[in-house]
Amino acid sequence: MINGHGDDIYQYGEIRCNFSSNISPLIDTGPLRQHLAERLTLINHYPEPDAYSLEVLIAAKHGISSNEVLVTSGATDAIYLIAQTLRDERTFAVKRPTFSEYADACRMYGYEEAPKAASKREQSDACISYAEHEQALTKFKGGAVRWLCNPNNPTGELLTTDTIKVLSRRHHWLIIDQSYEDYTWAPLLSAQHAIDMQNVIVIHSMTKRYAIPGLRLGYIIAPSAVIDRLRANYRPWAVNALAIEAGHWLMEHEEPYYREEMRMLLAQTQYLRDRLRGIFGIHVYPTSTNFMLCSIQPLGHRTLARQECTAAELKEYLLAHHGFLIRDASNFEGLKDCHFRIATQLPEFNDELVEAIKTFVYKVKRDA
């Protein structure tokens, strides 16, 4: 596990707005919290050993068999379970920057990373395209367990279903983490299509969909034979009783206004990205979801010594002067100390963040 995952609010106490968390601020968890408060006696009993009752509800939602669903204690639990189960494959491949746990889980179970061509382009630009990354893997023969985050964290990049189908034919296994699937309008791989491809395993996160990261709840969709293999390594009582109860309630109370909330959030994301792009010295990468990767460029007159500042310095400034927390992305493998990630929050805070970053950058520029 990398040192310093996102949303490290626990280190800072009270803050005014948490831009490091990529959970939607528009989702009201009040009714769910009230429901769970009335069922706290569940903690006096063991939960279901395998959360089967929730798997039935999830399968019905996707129109598949319950034998093709496995509920886990969050998406990260699913990642390590998959890496453990497929460890005989011995080799994994991943394009960075992305969520660190794919590589960490594979290394824990003895995998080696597929060799890559160390091109100048790949060394100089952390955000190379998938096409370039796949080209770098062409000399590698023997498949691999290929990991994708789609949409990708921290870049917000998204692959089409056609591209995913091509990748599935190039690798023994294709693992797709769709944790952010509800934070984009783009069409993603359906459950049935994934199952039909036979070598594709899809990870889903109820944490992101329903804004409940503290409960740790997710699930895997795959062909039934693959689910059987995963169950062979599944820990009994892996999902706690309150999380299972939350899953039941959420499956039965999907709010119809959720899509409108997402429309508002993604519209605000585009607005925030456009405003950030207007700040001299700030580069903002394209995104297909509610968060965006940014970098601080060197500042100062081109004929003089140029002043460099880091994402860590910006983070500390925003905390100290505005009570805002952003994600220092420098610890993503492949990124540098100039990279940071911002997730869209409420409009009034978004506007204030832009002005705060502008003030910081211009102050550095004046001091250069």
Image (spheres, rainbow, N blue to C red):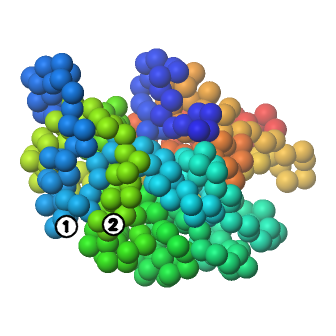
Q: Nearer the viewer, residue 248 or 3?
A: 248
Q: Amino acid at mark 1?
A: Ile
> Which of the labelled discs sits on residue 216, or is there none?
none
Image location of residue 125, percent across then percent down: 72, 62
Crowd tier of the residue under label 1, counting other residues whose Cα lies within 10 Å: few below 14, some 14–19, many 20 or above? some
Q: Nearer the viewer, residue 96 or 229?
A: 229
Q: Secondary structure at mark 1?
A: loop
Q: Secondary structure at mark 2?
A: helix
Marks 1/2: CA distance?
A: 14 Å
Image location of residue 308, percent across then percent down: 78, 42
Q: Is residue 161 above or below residue 104?
A: below
Q: Which residue is mark 1?
A: 64
Q: Residue at x 63, y 63 (%)?
A: 91
Image location of residue 147, percent across then percent down: 53, 62
Q: Is residue 191 above or below residue 229?
A: below
Q: Residue at x 26, y 73 (%)?
A: 192
Q: Residue at x 19, y 67 (%)?
A: 64
Q: Which residue is mark 2?
A: 225
**Which quadrant is the C terminus positioned in?**
top right
Q: Residue at x 73, y 67 (%)?
A: 115
Q: Amino acid at mark 2?
A: Ala
Image location of residue 106, percent across then percent down: 59, 52
Q: Is residue 41 visible?
A: yes
Q: Earlier in the sequence, mark 1 or mark 2?
A: 1
Crowd tier of the residue under label 2, counting other residues whose Cα lies within 10 Å: few below 14, some 14–19, many 20 or above? few
